[in-house]
Amino acid sequence: MKMKLAVLPGDGIGPEVMDAAIRVLKTVLDNYGHEAVFENALIGGAAIDEAGTPLPEETLDICRRSDAILLGAVGGPKWDHNPASLRPEKGLLGIRKEMGLFANLRPVKAYAPLLNASPLKRERVENVDLVIVRELTGGLYFGRPSERRGPDGNEVIDTLAYTREEIERIIEKAFQLAQIRRKKLASVDKANVLESSRMWREIAEETAKKYPDVEVSHMLVDSTSMQLIANPGQFDVIVTENMFGDILSDEASVITGSLGMLPSASLRSDRFGMYEPVHGSAPDIAGQGKANPLGMVLSAALMLRYSFGLEKEAAAIEKAVDDVLQDGYCTGDLQVKNGKVVSTHELTDKLIEKLNNSEARPRILQ
Ligand SMILES: NC(=O)C1=CN([C@@H]2O[C@H](COP(=O)(O)OP(=O)(O)OC[C@H]3O[C@@H](n4cnc5c(N)ncnc54)[C@H](O)[C@@H]3O)[C@@H](O)[C@H]2O)C=CC1
Ligand SMILES: CC(C)CC(=O)C(=O)O
Ligand SMILES: [Mg+2]
């Protein structure tokens, strides 16, 4: 297969984890006889510095002529005091919206070798395997108005707005996912307070009639945040509004031992997608070779599965991650008992070694 990929490393540890993902991807694609053309583009702070805007038109053009996008992370203290339109995060929100990527899938899986890396009790996190389906192009992060106002600028407004169609399509997506998983869906809202959540719940209840085989629960977001830590094993698929999903997924990363472990796929109705780790640009460790590349690497695996249907190749990357963790290798963010802490580059070398030696490697190349 031939594929054209847009590569948007971004800021902070973005370029470090992207380098890891590209090295891993090139190995697996080469092993399985596929061809990829990688085209780099600017986004976030790097784009502000070089092109004066967080999302240059050229970046959008590159993304539009690609089959999928890989994105690292954006942001950093250098740009924290910029006006709203010149913030790196504006570039990320902009590309999600421009490309129509309304469904963000954030899988959260407990890895056996990392059970002792989680601050949660082993028996709580063992066997956790859930997916947060986060609405990505509406809600509080996109509603207008969103501004400081009043004569002295001492009043402020953000807006949580959704249309019926926007809620329907994300809830449909979550039901479809639940149907091919363990058939359990938690729809998370704040329907005791927010009008938007009451419409969300109404639509979730209506949609449930089409999926009688899926067991649905409606949960309030505050209680869900407690349940995610107290009893994460109860969840299969969680579907929720943009900001709720953003917050719940960082919280859920604690189950895996580190925010650096979580991948994500930002999808629309066709096969196009943007693949990005859940974490940010981690300015506190940027440039030090300490970044955990696994969230980005696992995002590349999701890309092979969802955008290209390359299941074996995606599974080969996931197996390499399992195997390297099983051997005790990790980055410093993972508090693994007796873990062998290595750099971002070294952990990537280990993944590549596994991919090149693995039984999963196609026989023709062994
Ligand atoms: N998707 C994106 O591009 C996102 C960007 N951001 C931006 O990132 C910047 C920093 O935000 P923070 O709140 O600090 O969140 P963050 O996710 O960058 O970091 C939170 C903590 O987790 C650690 N961490 C995150 N990813 C890691 C990895 N791969 N390996 C090891 N440790 C890792 C960091 O060192 C830090 O201590 C901000 O400018 C924020 O707006 C935040 C979240 C998502
Ligand atoms: C930086 C924000 C725009 C988004 C965020 O935190 C996320 O997508 O996880
Ligand atoms: Mg976030």
Image (tube, rainbow, N blue to C red):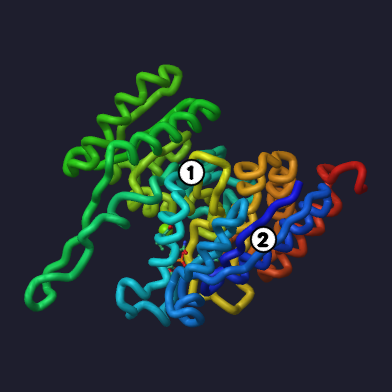
Residue 253's x, y, as percent? 48, 53
328 and 287: which is toward the camera: 287
Residue occupying the point 45% across, 78% down: 48
Residue occupying the point 66% across, 43% down: 308
7 and 214: which is toward the camera: 7
Residue 212's x, y, as percent? 41, 17
In-image side of 20 versus 250 (left or right): right
Decide if residue 139 is in sight here.
yes
- Callout 2 secondary element: helix
> Which quarter of the figure has residue 144?
bottom left
39 and 185: which is toward the camera: 39
Residue 276's x, y, as percent? 54, 57
To which residue does mark 1 refer?
Answer: 268
- For label 1, the crowd category at 10 Å Cα-Cα, with few meaning under 14, some 14 to 19 and many 20 or more, is some
Task: Tell me whether the residue at label 1 lies in contact with that at label 2, contact meaning CB atoms closer than 8 angstroms.
Answer: no
- Callout 1 secondary element: loop
In-image side of 202 versus 270 (left or right): left
Q: Nearer the viewer, mark 1 or mark 2?
A: 1
- For label 2, the crowd category at 10 Å Cα-Cα, with few meaning under 14, some 14 to 19 and many 20 or more, is many
**For residue 128, above or below residue 152:** above
Residue 104's x, y, as percent? 46, 47
Q: Amino acid at mark 1?
A: Arg
In-image side of 85 versus 238 (left or right): left
Which labelled disc corresponds to residue 193?
none
Decide if residue 128 is in sight here.
no
> Which quarter of the figure has residue 155?
bottom left
Residue occupying the point 92% across, 48% down: 366
Pointer 2 residue Cβ closer than 8 Å to ligand 1: no
Residue occupying the point 53% across, 51% down: 264
Q: Amino acid at mark 2?
A: Ala
To which residue does mark 2 refer?
Answer: 21
